[in-house]
């Protein structure tokens, strides 16, 4: 009898946790301004634009640091952001190439 009551308590607790998780996840979803869903191509394009912007800012910060127009801390932060972005872009490129090679290996 004790097992049944603890099981019903556990079940009700799970239902409550599940309901709370659903409320949190639905509340955390951003509301899209555009009626069309985001596409993979748009996501890749936006990520590439952000990467290019970060790389340009890092390069500009390095140049300003060499001339003394920007502090060392800002130059280091921009350089670290540039390095992180380049590593991410290279990893993405490697994954894209690997996926392309997998598609080429598929029998038709």
Image: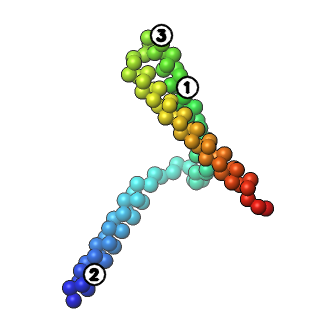
| Outermost residue to the left | 2
Q: CA distance from mark 3 to mark 1?
A: 17 Å
Q: Tag on residue 67?
A: 3
Q: Residue at x 39, y 57 (%)?
A: 27
- The residue that disc 2 covers is 8
- The residue that disc 1 covers is 56
Q: CA distance from mark 2 to mark 3?
A: 71 Å
Mark 3 neighbour density, 10 Å: few (under 14) some (14–19) many (20 or more): few
Q: Tag on residue 48?
A: none
Residue 40 horizontal/vertical position (percent):
61, 50
Q: Residue at x 53, y 39 (%)?
A: 88
Classify 77 as above or below 106.
Answer: above
Q: Residue at x 73, y 56 (%)?
A: 105
Q: Residue at x 73, y 59 (%)?
A: 106
Classify 95 as above or below 89.
Answer: below
N-term-proximal mark, 2 vs 3: 2
Asked whether the viewer can see residue 50, the reply is no
Residue 79 horizontal/vertical position (percent):
47, 26
Residue 1 horizontal/vertical position (percent):
21, 89
**Secondary-structure class at tag 3:** helix
Q: Is residue 71 left or right of residue 66?
A: left
N-term-proximal mark, 3 vs 1: 1
């Amino acid at each position: 009898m004790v097992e049944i009551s603890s099981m019903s308590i556990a079940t009700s607790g799970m239902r409550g946790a599940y309901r709370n998780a659903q409320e949190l996840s639905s509340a955390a979803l951003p509301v899209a301004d555009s009626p069309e869903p985001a596409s993979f191509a748009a996501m890749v394009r936006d990520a590439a634009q952000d990467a290019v912007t970060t790389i340009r800012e890092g390069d500009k910060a390095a140049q300003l640091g060499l001339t003394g127009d920007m502090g060392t801390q800002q130059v280091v932060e921009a350089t670290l952001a540039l390095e992180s972005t380049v590593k991410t872009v290279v990893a993405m490129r490697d994954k894209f190439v690997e996926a392309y090679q997998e598609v080429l290996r598929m029998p038709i």
